Image (spheres, rainbow, N blue to C red):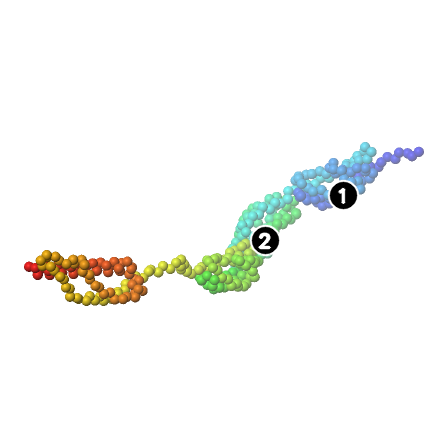
Amino acid sequence: MFEDVPFDLQIISFTFDGNPVRYKDESVIFRWEVQDAAKIFINDKEVPVENSFYSYQLSDAGLQSFILRIENAGTQKTSSLQIKVLDTPSFYITQNTDKLRKGKGEKCKIKWNIQNALSANLISGENEEINLTSERELSPDNTTDYIFEVVGLDGRRVFKHIVTISVFEVSVVQFEVDKNVTLPRVPIKLSWNVQNASEVELTDFGIVEHQGEKIVDCDKEKTFTLKVTDVFGVQEYHQRIRMYPLPLIRSIMVPTPQINQTLNVEMHFEQKQLQVDINVDTGKFPDFRQIKSEIYVPSIPFHQLELTPRKDWWQKMEDFSKSLTKRITNSISSLWNNRAL
């Protein structure tokens, strides 16, 4: 028969690496050496028996205890460690810009508020001690890193925070047209030259080279836009093409000419001897209505009479004939009356 051999359960060592004063959000590695342990716990969290270390991230500030517990057959043993956890320095830094235009005299205003630190320095070529809360205007000539270096609450550890102010050459843009006012469909030359840009875009042509020219024609007023993209954003440059006004002829109204043409018509009346028989005994006068006047009208080509309505012409001739007949009748009557007296 075998005799029962008691378990020799013991913790040979329990340690952690690093300083006993630590900062929040740091990781600490615990190490141990044990004998005859069936189960192992760190702060009641079971870890594999075959492991001999455990990594833990510190989350709370203050004095914290960590307990190693091992068990076997209802027997347990423990060991503990303490770590002082400090708040990590906090950097609250704001700036109105992180990009400046080179040679333009622009400034970047920085404000800072550093907490959980004993002291602070601002390093940029020189090491300058600064207050934990302050502000400053900076105007570097070139891209510069400003390092905020602070000493933590343990008085030994140094924390750093870097603020970069970038300085860039501004975009130089030339955008021209050979004429701003033209006629429809007359060619126009657009030309451009852009420096210190990442992308150039032209209306109707999309992305183009940083330098070039295009020949275009327009049938109406139009604005061409050159979009230039650089580190400061997108800038737009415009060229407006205008058109000379052209008259719009809807219709041509030509007044009908009034043509007055004088037609010289020579009319000859042959005077003939008028013989009238009068019966003295009866006093019977001849019927003058039977007397006909003869009018000679020269032959006139028809096309020369087109300017006067045909009806009006013959009406005038008829009126003239009646008037002449009446005048002749009155004259004869007057002569006869005078003779009788």
Q: Residue at x 67, y 43 (%)?
A: 25
Taking depth in this image into account, of 152 and 32 the one nearest to the observer is: 32
The answer to whether residue 105 shows anywhere in this view is: no
Reading the image, the residue beneath label 1 is 53
Taking depth in this image into account, of 219 and 162 the one nearest to the observer is: 219
Reading the image, the residue beneath label 2 is 164
Q: Quadrant of the N terminus?
A: top right
User: For the view shown, which residue lies furthest in the top direction?
Assistant: 74
Say above or below: 310 vs 90: below
Q: Is residue 300 left or right of residue 23?
A: left
Estimate the x, y position of residue 243 in percent, counting from the top left.
44, 60
Estimate the x, y position of residue 186 in percent, counting from the top left.
47, 63
Taking depth in this image into account, of 75 and 212 the one nearest to the observer is: 212
Callout 2: helix, strand or loop? Answer: strand
Q: Residue at x 71, y 42 (%)?
A: 56
Estimate the x, y position of residue 129 in percent, counting from the top left.
58, 50
